[in-house]
Image (spheres, rainbow, N blue to C red):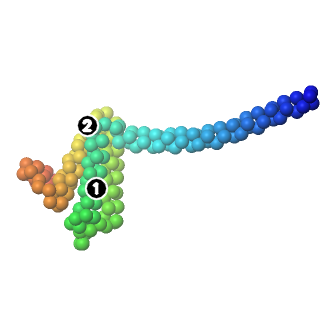
Amino acid sequence: TILQLCLIRYLILKTAILQTNINLIKSLFVYKEDNMKYTFSAVVGIIGGALTALLGGWDLAIQTLLIFMGIDYITGLMIAGIFHKSPKTESGSLSSLIGWKGLCRKGMVLLIVSVAVRLDMLVGTDFIRDAVVIAYCTNEAISIIENAGIIGIPIPKPILNAIDTLKNKEDEK
């Protein structure tokens, strides 16, 4: 009766406290998972922001350069891996060393862009970085067109003439 009611209330209270503790423990683990997700997102955001700042922002010029770099790398892999016509190896097939060198060159291009950004800041201009990015976009476009020619895709005559003109100007330097 009264003792039974007290015992029932005690068990209900004990169960509620136990359930609250279980929920608290669950919420701590969920919080830690969310915390890890937010920490990872923050780290990726900080690194991405720093790289974007080094490249002078995330504008159309940088996006175009990165897209051209990706297309050039992929077409180079196609030439070596599928068509076995790579002029960079004797057998014409894939070479991890050649691929690594290509990635290092593209990384160096991005470092030169960051140098151009700093020069713009130092001099107080806005055109050095843009000129460098446009020059490298042109270089990547030429490489993509050359890769298309190696694969066997016909290249329009005006584009071939433009490539020859640019190559001759480069040779004169």
Q: Is residue 122 visible?
A: no
How far across and down, in percent of the image, does residue 77 sit? Answer: 28, 60
State which quadrant residue 35 falls in: top right
Kind of residue sitting beneath label 1: Ile
Answer few, some or many: residues within 10 Å of disc 2's Cα (few below 14, many 20 plus, some between 14 and 19).
Answer: few
Q: Seen in the image, is 149 located left or right of residue 79? A: left
State which quadrant residue 119 falls in: top left
Q: Nearer the viewer, residue 172 or 103?
A: 103
In the displayed structure, would residue 3 be above or below residue 54? Answer: above
How far across and down, in percent of the image, does residue 18 sit? Answer: 76, 38
Q: Is residue 59 visible?
A: yes
Tell me the SS state at disc 1: helix
Disc 2 versus disc 1: nearer the observer: 1
Q: Seen in the image, is 32 located left or right of residue 96? A: right
Q: Residue at x 23, y 43 (%)?
A: 134
Kind of residue sitting beneath label 2: Phe
Mark 1 — residue? Answer: 74
Q: Nearer the viewer, residue 114 or 13?
A: 13
Q: Are marks 2 and 1 in contact (CB under 8 Å)?
A: no
In the displayed structure, would residue 121 be above or below residue 153? Answer: above
Q: Nearer the viewer, residue 130 or 125?
A: 130
Q: Residue at x 54, y 42 (%)?
A: 37
Q: Which mark is residue 49?
A: none
Mark 2–mark 1 distance (CA, rounded to whole Å): 30 Å
Mark 2 — residue? Answer: 127
Q: How many labels, in total?
A: 2
How far across and down, in percent of the image, does residue 166 sit? Answer: 13, 51
